[in-house]
Amino acid sequence: MYITLKDINKIYPNGFHAVHNFNLEIEKGEFVVFVGPSGCGKSTTLRMIAGLENISSGEFLINGERANEKGPREREVAMVFQSYALYPQMTVFDNIAFGLTLQGVDEDAIEERVKKTAQILGLTDYLDRLPRALSGGQRQRVAIGRAIIRKVGIFLMDEPLSNLDAKQRVTMRSEIAQIHQETGATTIYVTHDQTEAMTLADRIVVMKDGYIQQTGTPRELYFHPVNVFVAGFIGEPPMNFVRQTVANGRIRFGSQEIDLGKRLKNIADWEGKEIVFGFRPEAVQLAGAAEGYTLTGNVELTEMLGDNTNVYIKAGEQNVILKVDSHDTPETDVNLTFHVPFESVYLFDGETEKVIEN
Ligand code: ATP
């Protein structure tokens, strides 16, 4: 294994326990994304890997060798920050070359490598410019160039796209994916944006409150979330949840009943307990074919997004969102019947929030 994090904890000097028992193994060449809401400990973990923050307890190995005590340079990591951190008085060329100049690499070799890097990043025509004469996206590319030119083993990125506008973000996202394909560098990438995580990652680590919630491929997280948090975090619009106490094997959706026995073998064990019934907005069918639950609610609002429409439904106290083909956009203020196939229903224990294996 290339990188191993074993029972890593971070307790800041003020006593705040920011990261709890973090365990992860990363293979060479993998693109791993840490994702989670603000304050969940993603940056702290990345900074411990970078050597910018000391590790309170646990073991950090690179290539099987303990690296806890190694300084940032010895770890062979390069980091790209949210703020780019370019030198304003230096040209693009000198910014990209900076690390190599420090290492004492000879001038011809520097020139060759800078040109090659600039080519990969589409910066060839900008090498003489100063950072202030570049767009945000171009600056971010320079920051990435400065990191990849060093040919280090581990490439760390902390929210590298958050200062870009929406369109630039999409472009840079695909460029980062391409750079990774070309360089094959092991990459750890921090973001709070689940779309970035889903599109870039070989594997995603979902964090909350300093704890790993789930580690898996984008597919695993989308189709097999282990708990309510992951189910609600991955997917847009988020998964719908109906949270209720089971009575006679049923929960209610407005005035209708959902017979959980059709989906859950040991339903008797759940009598009087709280269950979270979940389904994704895109999993519903308007013309029911598959076996499933048939539900009805009032259409409160529709949002036509082009190829599909988000439909906001209310049934009693319950609000859910359906994502339908835009050709099927319903009128507002009418009753809409929809079907949730059994295989698209997720059930969670309301107390532990964990998925119920059936
Ligand atoms: P964001 O997306 O907002 O950057 P994050 O998931 O990267 O969030 P961290 O920056 O890792 O979160 O912070 C995790 C927790 O540790 C937060 O609650 C933060 O307030 C706390 N924290 C960060 N740095 C310190 C510090 N130097 N001393 C004490 N607490 C800190």
Image: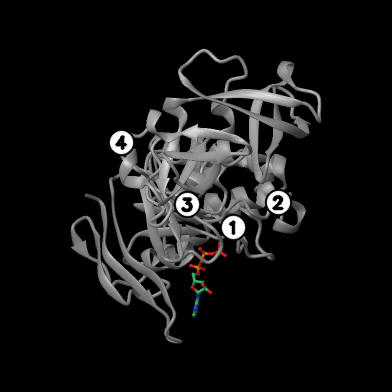
Position in image of residue 124 (x %, y %): 63, 40
Q: Quadrant of the C terminus?
A: top left
Quadrant of the image occupied by residue 263: top left
The span from disc 3 to disc 1 (Cα, nearest Å) is: 45 Å
- Residue 100 visible somewhere in the drawing: no
Position in image of residue 223 (x %, y %): 42, 34
Which residue: 37% across, 64% down? 49
Q: Foreground mark, 1 or 4?
A: 4
Three-letter amino acid code of the residue under disc 2:
Gly
Q: Is residue 102 above or below residue 353?
A: below
Q: Which residue is mark 3?
A: 229
Tell me the number on the disc at residue 94.
Answer: 1
Q: Foreground mark, 3 or 1?
A: 3
Tell me the number on the disc at residue 136.
Answer: 2
- 80 or 217, which is in the foreground? 217
The span from disc 3 to disc 4 (Cα, nearest Å) is: 19 Å
The span from disc 3 to disc 2 (Cα, nearest Å) is: 33 Å
Q: Which residue is mark 4?
A: 358
Given contact means CB atoms under 8 Å apart, are the residues at marks 3 and 4 in contact?
A: no
Crowd tier of the residue under label 1, counting other residues whose Cα lies within 10 Å: few below 14, some 14–19, many 20 or above: many
The span from disc 2 to disc 4 (Cα, nearest Å) is: 49 Å
Q: Which of the two discs, 1 and 4, labels the residue nearer the N terminus?
A: 1
